[in-house]
Image (spheres, rainbow, N blue to C red):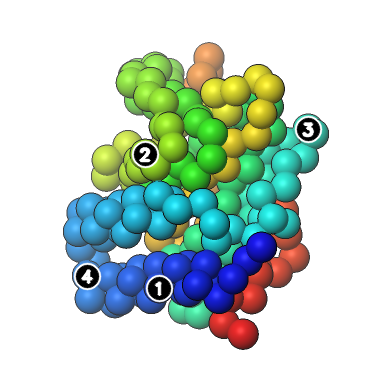
């Protein structure tokens, strides 16, 4: 059952990220490093995410909006991975910090070589692990649920309202890319301020 203390944990995280983005506007490396530390503390406790923001879909991974800054400087979302689900190869075009709340996910990064995408490092995020993405540090990847028999949930913080950002899906064999806007699985974020 969600308690006021649990809601406060997430509210405090929102305040920390808001302060960070205000104080370090334009300093992406500090935002990534400090944001990763704040997110690591948040995902260390799994008692604050509302159940409806962790519901899997049998066919597609879900992206639930948890919070968007009123000025759209950042957004916080939960990604819910059903068993064996994966993203296409994609980019973000903005900075992002990803923390593993439940389960585990595998991240396969890609680089362009002569117009063709080539896989580079492949890592696994386990409970409490945090990763970063941005055009400056590596932005093209494919993510999948490590587990074929259970749900995984990760929390993402992006440097924009990610559901509105025009991004790209990549086709590894050809290097071709297609524009997309992800939107969100939910209609409105949970109320953390009541």
Indicate the position of residue 14 as horizontal and vertical percent values: 43, 71
Secondary element type, mark 1: helix
Q: Nearer the viewer, mark 2 or mark 4?
A: 2
Mark carried by residue 129: 2
Whole-Å distance between the Cαs marked 3 and 4? 39 Å
Callout 2–callout 4 Cβ contact below 8 Å? no
Mark carried by residue 59: 3
* Residue 165 falls in image quadrant: bottom right
Please tell me which residue is depicted at 40% across the width and 50% down the height of the picture: 44
Mark 2 or mark 1: which comes first in sequence?
1
Q: Does residue 117 sit above or below 158 in this rendering? A: above
Residue under pointer 4: 24
Relative horizontal placement of residue 183, taking residue 129 as reference (left or right): right
Mark 3 or mark 1: which comes first in sequence?
1
Q: Is residue 7 visible?
A: yes
Residue under pointer 1: 12
Q: Does residue 70 sit above or below 42 in this rendering? A: below
Q: How many marks?
A: 4
* Residue 52 falls in image quadrant: bottom right
């Amino acid at each position: 059952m969600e308690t006021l203390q649990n809601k406060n944990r997430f509210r405090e995280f929102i305040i920390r990220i808001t302060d960070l983005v205000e104080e370090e506007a334009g300093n992406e490396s500090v935002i990534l490093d400090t944001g990763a530390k704040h997110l690591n503390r948040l995902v260390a406790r799994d008692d604050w995410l509302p159940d409806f923001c962790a519901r899997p879909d049998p066919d597609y991974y879900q992206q639930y909006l948890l919070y968007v800054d009123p000025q759209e400087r950042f957004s916080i979302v939960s990604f819910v991975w059903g068993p064996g689900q994966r993203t296409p190869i994609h980019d973000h075009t903005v900075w992002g910090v990803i923390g593993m709340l439940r389960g585990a996910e595998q991240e396969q990064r890609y680089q362009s070589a002569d117009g063709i995408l080539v896989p580079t490092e492949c890592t696994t995020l386990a409970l409490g692990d945090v990763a970063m993405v941005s055009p400056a540090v590596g932005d093209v990847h494919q993510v999948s649920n490590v587990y074929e028999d259970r749900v995984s949930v990760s929390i993402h913080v992006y440097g924009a309202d990610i559901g509105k950002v025009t991004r790209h899906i990549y086709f590894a064999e050809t290097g071709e890319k297609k524009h997309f806007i992800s939107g969100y699985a939910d209609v409105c974020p949970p109320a953390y301020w009541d």
